Amino acid sequence: MLGGLLDPQARVPSGYEPIHPAVMRQLNRWDVDVFVLGAPGEPPLLFRESGLAVQDSRVERLLSTIDRRVLVRTKDYYTLSEQLLASLETIQDGCHVPDTDRFAILQTAAAAALESTIPLVNPARFVNASRRISDHFVRLAETSSLSPASVFAIARHDQSAFTHATNVCCYSLILAEELGVTDRAQLDEIALGALLHDIGMRHVPAEILRKPGALSPREMEVVRKHPQLGYEELLSTTSLSLPQMLMAYQHHEHVDGRGYPVGAVRDEIHPWSRLLAVVDVFDSLTGRRPYRPPFSPEEAMHHLEERSGTQFEKEVVQCWRQLLQL
């Protein structure tokens, strides 16, 4: 069973965000209150008040005692994200930082860049912010030995746009390399395409995205427009390749022609879109949603295999299973 420090099945109380201790180690100062999960049904417990310098030896002693996630208030989360983003170049190049810690830091740093730019009318700024983040993911993939299991154990598994995009980006790179993609330029394209694949979801009303029950046919029709809308938005930029735009347009197409938006069949679907479809569904299933609890990796893999050859490319599903080592 996959698992790890950040137990993806644990529910984070409303108003708080999970932070890996590795993130806290990279800050010069704890300028926010830090909490730990309390007993079931109880509010989080204050772990350390703001104002403690990280150089203080007490910090490492405190962090070394934690065998679970720490939390910060949601209002403070993006402050931490911006601090990390400003120093990301130095952190990511630090050979002393473990690979899994680098992923946790990168995912947290991505929050401010992606969440603050995705609502903008002009998608160019979101594309540019995503390009900066995707470059760091490619560098991480090139210089690390991260596996899907290690990423799953440390990644966030909530329903936010940046969480899903960063998980899918990292999974896509690992899977692409296993399938034989070694060219740096192609990996750059795949990483950015993966980060941008759901850009059309910003046009789906929040009440639909947060609905706790099954969607009505009308609501489902609204959701199914997001690949087309995302593709049209990306067409307005001049910096993306056609395969990258097709990752947004085709990631819900099925190899048997029963997907959407146009019912493309097998070879009509770009290989990167077929790759993306597998990890996109895997991360969606293993993430927490308002209408269901998260699937375990084993349950998500079973879902993929049941649809191998109809919804998904068989070779890609088989490769993903081998990488997961279930």
Image (cartoon, helix red, strand yellow):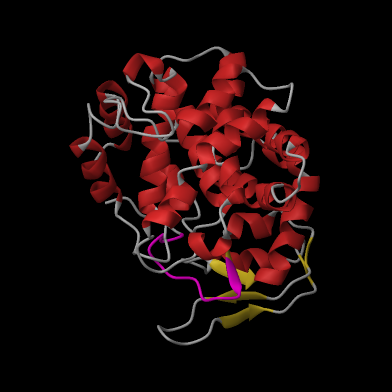
Q: Check the image and report above or below for 176 versus 119.
A: above
Q: Outermost residue, bottom direction?
A: 42
Nearer the observer, 89 or 294 = 294
Q: Check the image and report above or below for 257 versus 55.
A: above
Instruction: Answer whether residue 98 is visible to the viewer in this image.
Output: no
Point out residue 2 in the picture as x, y percentages from the top left corner. 32, 50
Nearer the observer, 207 or 102 = 207
Residue sitting at 30 percent across and 48 percent down? 297
Q: Check the image and report above or below for 303 versus 12.
A: above
Q: Outermost residue, left direction?
A: 306
Residue 8 picture quarter:
bottom left
Left or right of 163: which side holds 77? Answer: right
Residue 307 picture quarter:
top left
Residue sitting at 72 percent across and 40 percent down? 126
* Prevailing secondary structure of the magenta residues: loop
Residue sitting at 45 percent across and 26 percent down? 273
Q: Does the magenta stretch include residue 11?
A: yes
Nearer the observer, 109 or 278 = 278
Nearer the observer, 156 or 160 = 160
Q: Outermost residue, front direction?
A: 218
Point out residue 115 in the picture as x, y percentages from the top left corner. 68, 52
Q: Is residue 321 magenta?
A: no
**Quarter of the C terminus within the rendering:** top left
Point out residue 254 in the picture as x, y percentages from the top left corner. 33, 30
Left or right of 273: which side holds 120? Answer: right
Point out residue 18 in the picture as x, y percentages from the top left corner. 56, 64
Q: Magenta region: which residues?
A: 6-17
Instruction: Answer whether residue 151 is visible to the viewer in this image.
Output: yes
Residue sitting at 37 percent across and 63 percent down? 9
Q: Check the image and report above or below for 295 versus 175.
A: below
